[in-house]
Image (cartoon, grey):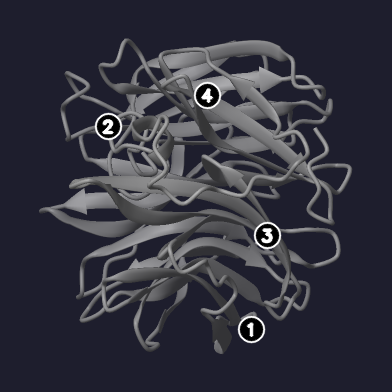
Amino acid sequence: MRIGIILFGVTLCGILTMGLTGCPQPRPPSTPVGWEYALYPSNIGETIHQHAGGGYFVAGTASLEGTYGVCQFVCLTSTGAIESTFYLPDAFAQSGDGPSVTALLASDGYVYGAALTARDTPADSQGRLRVFKADPLGNVIWDYIHGDEKWVPQAIAEMEQGGTLVAGKRMINFTSHPMVLRLDGSWDISWHTTLDRAQAFMSIRGVVVAHDGRVLVTGYDNPSDIDVALWALDGDGTHLWYRRYDRPNSHLGRSIAQSQDGGFYVAGLESVGGLRRRAYLLKTDSAGEFEWDRADIYEPDAEWANVDIWDMALDDEGYIVMVGEEESTMYVGTIPVIAHRSFVMRLDPLGNLQWRTQFSGQLYGLDITQQGTYVATGAIMRDKVAHIRVIELDKAGNVVN
């Protein structure tokens, strides 16, 4: 799961401070703040895609009767009405830094996804990879569980020549190794590769298929310090090259996109002394060679000490759009309270901030719509219940739904 804020009791400022004034207050826009859905006792939207009909498909997690997180899916019309909703039995929300379920709407009109499924019980940490195909109305075409090893899916992409890429990590002897596999239209794995290196605590967070068919994946590597890592594969899974960017402070790549000049942007976070997180953006050329990086793309208010970037996309003008959140630990008496607020921001191709719009709650997933607007999903607390939230913004940062 992304953070475990909703499902596992890490408390939002708005929950503990009903009527209290000790928390800094978010600054939501005066316009409406999107669509909200409460389908189960607790709900989080993690990824969102617009389908050819103009509606949206949201994948995320739900808590069933407060026991554990399962993977849920919601299909919406273009006006936000629910067309269908379903969840995968026994596909549970993993803990740690990353999505619980990853899914996309492919060009053939079907949903392809991957999740982690427990072997015997939802509490079993040694889960197995689960892949599935469904139509946008929630009718499952196939649903298959692979192998005995713990493969943790964290990113997904569609191959131009057909097939689906799933990237994440493979747990071997309590260490994580980058893992990429390809599904050819069914649950069968046509190839998979584990990107082993001598320094073996690595993880993949983002994947993109380049214009020339190469597969680029990003995450982190920590032989001595945590650094952004970038791997390139060809369409058959052959390892082409690996880059690790040894920059001052620690860095983690969470999302990757190809720039208009053929290079790549990697978005994530910078950790300063292990005490403060900042938004981070790195730019490479088409061969993965370093060009520039920036940790000044988002300057939070002083009381909001930490910033996380969760997702990134490029719009039709080549501008960079990101979603993320600010986090601060406040104290109500002697009780620590973790307070959050989210944001959508737009940067020019050099990483200069164009605008930033802030909201209460969290935003985790992002897509660029057919109309050129930006749609994001996450969660918002209402009466102690986490609701899925969907927000659409125009290129000027105004909420339009």
Q: Nearer the viewer, mark 1 or mark 4?
A: 4
Q: Going 40% across and 65% down the picture, which residue do you hit? A: 305
Residue 285 badge: 1
Asked if residue 203 can be seen in this view, the reply is: yes
Question: Element at badge 1?
Answer: loop
C-alpha distance separating marks 4 and 2 = 15 Å
Q: Quadrant of residue 13?
A: top left
Q: Dot 2 corresponds to which residue?
A: 9
Q: Going 20% across and 75% down the picture, which residue do you hit? A: 198
Q: Position of residue 372 (x, y in %)?
A: 86, 49
Q: Amino acid at mark 2?
A: Gly
In the image, residue 344 above or below residue 15:
below
C-alpha distance separating marks 1 and 3 = 23 Å
In the image, residue 120 above or below residue 281:
above
Q: Amino acid at mark 3?
A: Met
Residue farthest along the right direction in this orientation = 371
Q: Earlier in the sequence, mark 2 or mark 3?
A: 2
Q: Dot 3 corresponds to which residue?
A: 345
In the image, residue 129 above or below residue 281:
above
